[in-house]
Image (cartoon, rainbow, N blue to C red):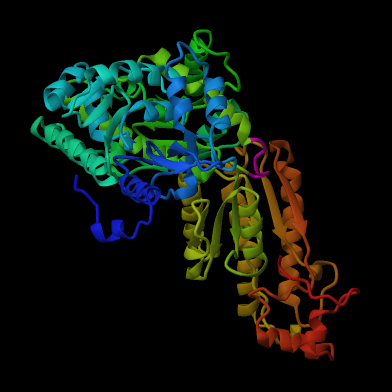
Amino acid sequence: MKSLWNDNEASRCESELDLRVYSSRLLGSDPSLALHGGGNTSVKITEPDLFGEAEEILYVKGSGWDLATIESAGFTPVRMAHLLKLAQLDFLSDNEMVNQLKTHQTLASAPTASVEAILHAVLPYKYVDHTHADAIVTITNTEDGEARIRNLYGDRLVVIPYVMPGFDLARMVAERFPREAHEGTLGMVLMNHGLFTFGDNAQVSYERMIRLVDEAESYLRTQNAWELVPTAEETEIDSQSIATLRRSISDVAGFPVILQSHRTEAEMSFCQRPDLAEISQRGPATPDHVIRTKQLPMLGNEVMDYVLAYQQYFEAYAGNARTPVEMLDPAPRVVVDPVLGMLSVGKNSREADIVADIYRHTMEIIQRAESLGGWQALPARDIFEVEYWELEQAKLRKAGATAPFQGEVALVTGAASGIGRACVESLLNRGAAVVGLDLDSAIAYQHDSTAFLGITCDVTDSQAIVSALQQTVLRFGGLDMLVLNAGIFPGGCPVAELTSETWRQVMQVNLDANLQLLRESYALLKQAPTGGRVVVIGSKNIAAPGQGAAAYSASKAALNQLARVTALEWAGDGIRINSLHPDAVFDTSIWTEEVLAARAAHYGLSVDAYKKRNLLKTEITSR
C-alpha cells in the first residue's frame, strides 16, 4: 500500500477542514480501506461562536456520506466540551446519544454525526482517521488475532477488544486509551472492526494509516496468506433457477428485490470451496457490514427450503436481542452456491451492487484469514445485535416510502428512441431496473445508471432474444414488466405494389419477434413477485388504417389479437396484458423525414400541420 499524498494538491486546501476533506478522499479512494462509505474521519477546530468566544468543535463525518466523495458539507460540527462530558457518563442509550449529538451540533442543516463521534472526541489528537482496512480485519478475524496484532505492532498500537459501536465503545476507549497510550503510539486497533490513526496534521494521520496497513499486508505475504489463486469449474447458467430464487427471496422479504449474479473465476472459486457451507456462515468481516451481508449457501436447487432455513436462523436470535426487534427482515443479502455462483440481493440495483462489492472483499478476507490460521468472525449473537440495533432500525424507518417500481425489472424493445426511450426513462424514474433492446449500438451507453442495461439486439434474431433474456436475469434476477415497442413502418405503398419481401419483413419485426419475446419471457413473468405485466405498443391503424399502410396495419392488427389471446391464457398465472394504441406520435424512429413528408402530402397538409392533426392541434410526443 502506497501513500497518495500530493503536496501540490494539499497546498490548494485553504483550511483545516479542506485538508480533512482531501485526506478523507484519499482514504476513500482505496476500497481495501474504506468500502462504500465505511470508516470515518474527523478534525478538531477552534473557532469563534456567535458571541466571539473561542470554542473547540469536532468536525466528524456525517451519517450517509462516503469518504470517497465527501465534501465539507459532509462533516458535522459538534461541540467538543459536550462530547467529553458525555464520555464520562456511566450509561447512555443509543437513541439518547444520537439526540445529544444532534442537539449539540452547531449547524442545524448538517447531517447526523457518526455514532463514533464521542470516540473521535476522546482521542487527544487534531486529526483522527478510522478505516476497516481489509488487511487489519483479516488478521484480527483469526483465532489468535489479538496475539498476532500485538506481535506485529508491539506497543505502537493500543488494542481494544470488540465492543459494539456506539457509546459503550467510546466509554471503553475513554477509559483505556489514556492508560495505554504513550508518545510512540501511532494508532489503535479495534478487534473485528478496524484501525484508528491520528496526528497533529492531516498528512501525519493519513500516512500513519497507510504505513500500518502496508505492514499488515506485508505480514500476510510473509505468512503465505495474501496471494489468492482462483480455480473454478465452469457451470451452466440456469436462468430459471435464478428467477425462482428471486421470487422466493422477494416473498420472504415482503417486496420485490433485485438479484444480481456474479460469476468471475475468483467468485466461483470461493463458491466452490468444499467447506463453503461452513465457512460462509461464520459472520461478516466487520460489524459495519452485517446489515448488507447476510449469507447462507444454497446447495442444489432447494430454493424455498434454503430461504426458510435462513429465516429460522434469524428468528432463533430474535428473543436474545438487547433491543426490541422491529421490521425483522429475514431475507438474505448474499447467496453463495457452487453452481449459481455469488448472488447479491438489494432493494434496488445500487444496493445490490454495494452488497456485491462488500462480499467480494469479505471473500478475500475469509480466504486469507483461513490461510493465516482460521477465519473467525464475531459470535452470532453479536452479529444479530448489530443487525437489529435500534439505530439501524431507525435508518430503515427513516427511509420511508419507496419508488413505485423499486426492486422490479422491466425490458423494453426499440428502446433507443421515441416511445421506447420515453418508456425507459419513465420506468427508471419510478425506480425500476430496466433492460433496453435496440438495433442501435448507442443503446449500450444511453443511461449512466447501474439500474440500466442496454443491449444491442436484433429482435428478429431468435438466439439474440434468448441471450438478452439471459443477460437480464444475470444482471437483475428476473423479469416483471415487458414493453413490446420495437416496430417498423415502411414508406407508403399501395397493396397493388406491395412486395412479398416488404410484407415479410414488416411481419417479422412487428409480429413474429413479439411472439418469440412473449414465449421466451413467459416462465420469467410467472415468477414476478407482484405479478407479470406486458404492454404491447399497438397502433390506431388497428381500428382506423390508412391507405398505403397495409403491411404495418395488418401486422399491428395481428399483434393485437396475439395480445388478446395471450391475456386469456396467462391470466391464471397472474400476468396481465394491455395494448396501447398511439396515434400521430412523430418523434420516433419509424417516422423518418421521408415517411413524414409522404404522409403529410397524402392528406394535402404541411408537415407541421400533419403533426398537429388532432382536436387540440397539439403535437404529441413520446413522453
Residue located 34% across and 32% down the image: 338
* Region of the chain picked out in magenta, as a range: 400-405
Give whichever of 355, 206 is nearer the camera. Answer: 206
Residue 94 vertical placement versus 359 (above, below):
above
Whether residue 472 is visible to the viewer of this picture, yes or no, is yes
The outermost residue toward the right is 615
Report the residue at 72% width, 36% height from top: 572
Please indicate whether residue 293 sits to the left or right of residue 594 in the image: left
52 or 617: nearer the viewer:
52
Is residue 524 highlighted in magenta?
A: no
Q: Residue at x 68, y 50 (%)?
A: 534
Q: How far from the left and from the top, in percent, is residue 253?
A: 58, 28
The percent position of residue 541, horizontal first and vertical second, equals 80, 71
Query: Residue 366 placed where, x, y %?
Result: 27, 28
521 in relation to 618, above or below = above
The residue positioned farthest toward the top in the image shown:
319
Tell me residue 59's x, y (percent).
Answer: 43, 39
Quadrant of the frame with the C terminus = bottom right
